[in-house]
Amino acid sequence: MISTAIRLARVGSGSELAAALLLVLSFPCVMLAAIIPNIWFFAAAAAVTYLADTFLHQRGSYLVNRLAKVRAGLSIRFLIRQMLLVLLVARSGLGEDRIFYVTVVAVLVFYGLQAPHGAIVTLLRLRRRLPVVTRNIDLGAIRIPDAPPRWLLSRSAEKMLHLDLFAMVGVIITLQTRDNLYGFAGLGLSVLLAVGYILALLPYLRPSRLVPNAEKVLKAVDGWLADYRPTVMLYFSGSKESAYQVNMWLETMGQLNGRPLIVLRERVIAQQLGPTAVPVLCVPGGVHLMNLDLSTVRVALYAANVGKNIHMLRVPTMKHVFIGHGDSDKLASVNPYSKAYDEVWTAGRAGRDRYALADVGVRDEDIVEVGRPQLAPIEPASGSTRNPVPTVLYAPTWEGWDDSPGNTSLLLAGENIVKRLLKAERPVRVLYKPHPFTGTRSAKAKAVHERIIALVGKAAAERATDARWAEDAAGLREEQNAARTELARLGARLTELSGGADASRDEAEESRDSKADPARQAELTRLRREWNGAYWRSFGWWEHRVISGSEPALYDCFNESDAMVSDISSVVSDFIASGKPYAVTDSAELGAEEFKRQNTAVRAAVILSNSAKELDQLLAAVTDPSADPLAEARRELKRYLLGPDEPTSIEQFDAATRALAAKSLARNVGVEQRLAEPEAAPAPDDSAPSEPRAEDSPVGG
């Protein structure tokens, strides 16, 4: 019942639901206390409204946003509470007393000060916002001053409104003691502090404290582009949940020859972009993007099929390539939108064959096999398990945009898979790493996901007290404590290097101060590798684990695992690079043969039904290599899906980039030559004079 209420109220937890209920119920109590009147009842109920409101705002509760939509926003709630204070004064027999009139005037003045305060804060935020967000780009050509102190602008409306606490407390004490001095002091202090807040903001409205206008900023960016002369560009647009799709290409972009550039379209993606030394330019405005000088770019790479791609696809001076964000048998891998690009790059022969079978208009000669450079960190199978207890990774994909049963194994098979793994006759360790989008569209998928987390957590707690692991746990305790200490140290340093520690800087300052630093990037890479090692050492090799968030990364989980269970997605294709056993769930119940026929990546997999009863085959292959009949099939499938091991994927990818850049240059030179040639005039006919024809007229007749 509570979970249903949480879902209906659109709150994130039971504590948020409780706070929401208190907020809704306490305002009528405040009104009742004012009418009775009862001073202490009023004070208690008002305190609850303050606390519940503050808690919900700090949590960023959806309910708070909805209240604003029904004319019960933050300012209105504070005004209602202040008006009820006036009512309490009147009902307490002081309606003709000076404290009543001073309270009314002070409340009106205080509320009136909200308007200039809100206007100044809004203006400051707007004038501190650049038309672009940059990283690793020198904006020294323009002057970007420091931002106002964060405490002035962060949650400014709440801070301003909460200054009425002094008035509230002062008047309540006056009502209790009948001494007007307390009320006058509280009311005066609230008004003076509100005026002071406004005065503290005013100096930052001076022109010298604001960023240059959009025209100057874009001119500076064009100047930088003219100096840097980018040749290959990664273009990306998407929602905040899709940042992983561009993050997977950052390392590849940093390894390319030439002068790479990353172009983003949403500020939220820029905020979530991983560390990179490659210049990053986020241009939210389509008009601004179209007016930038990107004439030196020869190749544009696209990681997703989205509507805003058209803003770049319209540029004819560069070649456009769809590289995607994974290689799988999903329909997204053969999207008809791919016809819009000059070339489509796939990992191996399988991608080419998919387009041929789908017949969506992508020509075979426009498909180039380049491997998957991102798979370089995946370690190949060693022939034995990493630890005495095998580790099985369950990495289901998300529910997708429709309710097709083949989208994810979570809904029909997820719990069965996890239960069978947890209760396996020969113990295994379970790692559960869900897709970042899991539960974002389907409430059912979210509910199953939460139940699986509970299952893994319960099993982990039981295993922690199991006598079978007591001796190992005691022997590793010191190492684990050292690893946790190391994690904290490395995490702090990673946060510092990533720029996440200084929350006082705004977007403009970040763009101004972010400079390319290869040495810093190299240190980040090293520290992430050390952090990953410390993470796995921080708990026992027999302990079940739920792994959410971006760290450790999926490929790190691959390397730690001895086998994997997943769905039809790029996760399966990527895991095949390891050569380890894997299972894929036929959630749509097509049958093993038809499932293999439709999905190339499962041809060397153990096919699971929704009951997951076939998991014993996977576990047998993990514990005994001689009981692994699919080993050779996996090796052949790896070559088919991902291409040859030599040359390396990054070498193939870079060669394809250079080859297409040469085609782009040849095209542009050819166009310039044709435009430079005068139009050939027809030879005159001297046989006989003729009358001018209508179609020969300069205006076309």
Image: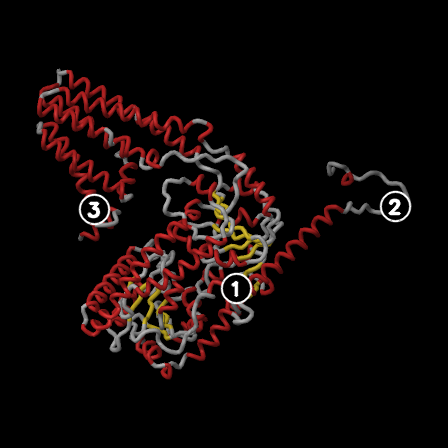
Mark 1 closeness class: few <14, some 14–19, many ≥20 residues within 10 Å = many
Report the Cα–Cα distance between label 3 and label 2: 91 Å
Question: Which residue occupies 51% across, 49% down?
Answer: 279
Q: Position of residue 302 (x, y in %)?
A: 51, 54
Q: Which of the pair 641/406 is nearer the observer?
A: 641
Q: Which of the pair 423/271 is nearer the observer?
A: 271
The amino acid beneath tag 2 is: Asp
Report the Cα–Cα distance between label 1 and label 3: 48 Å
Question: Which residue occupies 22% across, 46% down?
Answer: 16
The residue to which callout 2 is attached is 685
The amino acid beneath tag 3 is: Leu
Q: Position of residue 129 (x, y in %)?
A: 44, 37
Q: In the picture shown, does residue 560 fall above or below 619? A: above
Q: Which of the pair 631/173 is nearer the observer?
A: 173
Residue 346's disc is 1
Q: Is residue 463 visible?
A: yes
- Residue 571 lies left or right of residue 316; in this view the side is left
The amino acid beneath tag 1 is: Thr
Report the Cα–Cα distance between label 2 and label 1: 57 Å
The residue to which callout 3 is attached is 17
